[in-house]
Amino acid sequence: MKKTLIYFLLFCASALVGRTVAIHYLPDYIYSRFSKMALSRPGAAVNQFSVLMAPDENAKLVVKPNPDFAYATLFYDLTDGPIHILGAMPDSIYWSVALYQENTVNFYVKNDMQYDSDTLNIIISDDAMDQEADIEQIVSPEKTGFVLIRVLVAERDEAHQKAISDYLNALQIP
């Protein structure tokens, strides 16, 4: 009986330690590894978009990517102030914007049907500020994080893919 109780207590302690590691440390580790990998690519930098067009099974940057979407990603750092993202988005094609904290928790998501126009015009800041009527402000819970913009690539022909690539590559941080 005493041996069973010791095994049970060891199991409970192991489960508690495993849960703590999985919830509190694993997401930060995954984010840091992902950001280092993504930012080590040629031309990649913090506060600069990187575009990945309709990935295939060989894509390493996005884990199990959906081949029906093109992705624009941005690791942001608000240390030097807010970030303004501005750009035209495709009309009559699904697109979405999602923001994540370093611990991979999603704190903002919106798709094309929820925007009033086909212009993406947002400011990411770490605290509330006076905003203009046509600019949406998103308050980030942390100074660093990740932006993911997805656009549906419904047509696989070269003209449609180039048009979507042009939209994503034209995203600005003025």
Image (cartoon, rainbow, N blue to C red):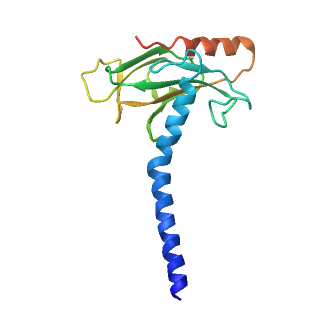
Give me the residue at 49% from left, 35% from top: 32
Q: Position of residue 138 (x, y in %)?
A: 36, 29
Quadrant of res 58: top right
Q: Is residue 122 left or right of residue 70?
A: left
Count of marks overlaid on the render: 0
Give me the residue at 54% from left, 77% from top: 7
Quadrant of res 127: top left
Image quadrant occupied by the C terminus: top left
Give me the residue at 56% from left, 14% from top: 43
Q: Is residue 84 above or below residue 21?
A: above
Q: Nearer the viewer, residue 132 or 61?
A: 61
Q: Is residue 169 left or right of residue 102?
A: right
Give me the residue at 33% from left, 21% from top: 82
Q: Position of residue 120 (x, y in %)?
A: 46, 19
Q: Position of residue 56 (x, y in %)?
A: 73, 28
Q: Nearer the viewer, residue 121 or 2?
A: 2
Residue that lies at the very extreme toward the bottom in this rendered image: 1
Q: Is residue 74 above or below residue 86?
A: below
Quadrant of res 41: top right
Q: Nearer the viewer, residue 39 or 59?
A: 39
Q: Position of residue 10 (x, y in %)?
A: 51, 72
